[in-house]
Amino acid sequence: MTPYYRKHGKILDPITDDAFAEGMTTGHFANEAHKAYPVILYYSAVRNAEALRARKEQFTVADKSLMFDVGPRLKKIRRRIKGQTLSEDEFAKVFKRRQAQITTPPLPLPIDAPFMDQLIKQIDRTEAGKRVFPWSIRTAYNIVDRAFAYPHLFRLSRITWFFLPHDEVGRPRGFSIPEVRTFTGLSLAALDYYIGRADVADMGRAIYLKERGVSNGS
């Protein structure tokens, strides 16, 4: 268990938009530039390391979206397969093969979403070729810890959200597994967990509707 799980406990409830807004508004940020970091994690669902390595050129504006070219996703590659430890050469071959499989298209992040201006400001003040979030992994964790909990909570929240109903965009059953896999770079096995989280949320909502004697259309 990581130190952050020990401090906060393993949180299973996704962050809501209201909770995110409260953290951004009332949370402690040691530096104004730090406010951009929770924003990229919340809207993109990228891993902590994927955000930290991002450079200015990986962000471009197209129409009303900020396009984030994440690059090869940092999916964990096991050092041991079937009880055997891979040599450095074998690991390099597996990594090269897997790298081609886990590169996702640029992610469209809505420019007009709350607090996106903080992210855009941070990108604008970053020099060409430099990292947008030039902090150590410890500092990154501390930024999130002071206002929220730990970085992975943003990833859990966004991926779970994808599988919930979204009538506002004509997706009453949420987004499909292939779509979410393309956005996140997760394996099918890993996505099963998030689908389960979304299904449980739907089940709880259905109980409430049944008890109140209302239908989804009311």
Image: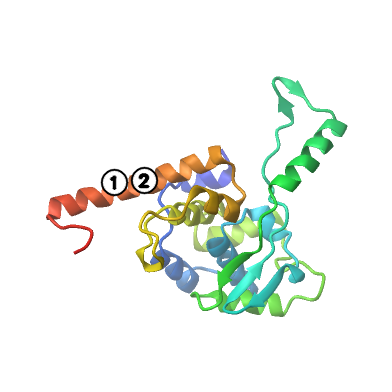
Question: What residue is rendered at 56% in x and 60% in y?
Answer: 144
**Residue 97 position by quadrant:** top right
Q: Is residue 7 left or right of residue 211?
A: right
How far apart are the two marked residues, 2 and 1, measured between alpha carbons? 6 Å
Which residue is farthest top?
A: 83
Question: What residue is rendered at 53% in x and 68% in y?
Answer: 28
**Residue 75 position by quadrant:** top right
Whether residue 195 appears in this view of the structure is yes
| Crowding at mark 1 (Cα within 10 Å: few <14, some 14-19, many 20+) | few
- The C terminus appears in which quarter of the rendering? bottom left
Question: What residue is rendered at 54% in x and 64% in y?
Answer: 43
What percent of the width, then of the height, locates residue 156?
50, 51
Q: Nearer the viewer, residue 100 or 4?
A: 100
Which residue is label 2 attached to? 199
* Helix, strand or loop status at disc 1: helix
Which residue is farthest right?
A: 89
Q: Nearer the viewer, residue 81 or 116?
A: 81
- The N terminus appears in which quarter of the rendering? top right
Whether residue 30 appears in this view of the structure is no
| Crowding at mark 2 (Cα within 10 Å: few <14, some 14-19, many 20+) | some
Q: Residue type at mark 1?
A: Met
* Helix, strand or loop status at disc 2: helix
Q: Nearer the viewer, residue 191 or 43?
A: 191
Circles 2, 1 touching at the beta carbon (< 8 Å):
yes
What percent of the width, then of the height, locates residue 8?
48, 48
Q: Which mark is residue 179?
A: none
Q: Nearer the viewer, residue 104 or 153?
A: 104
Q: Which mark is residue 203?
A: 1
Q: Residue type at mark 2?
A: Asp
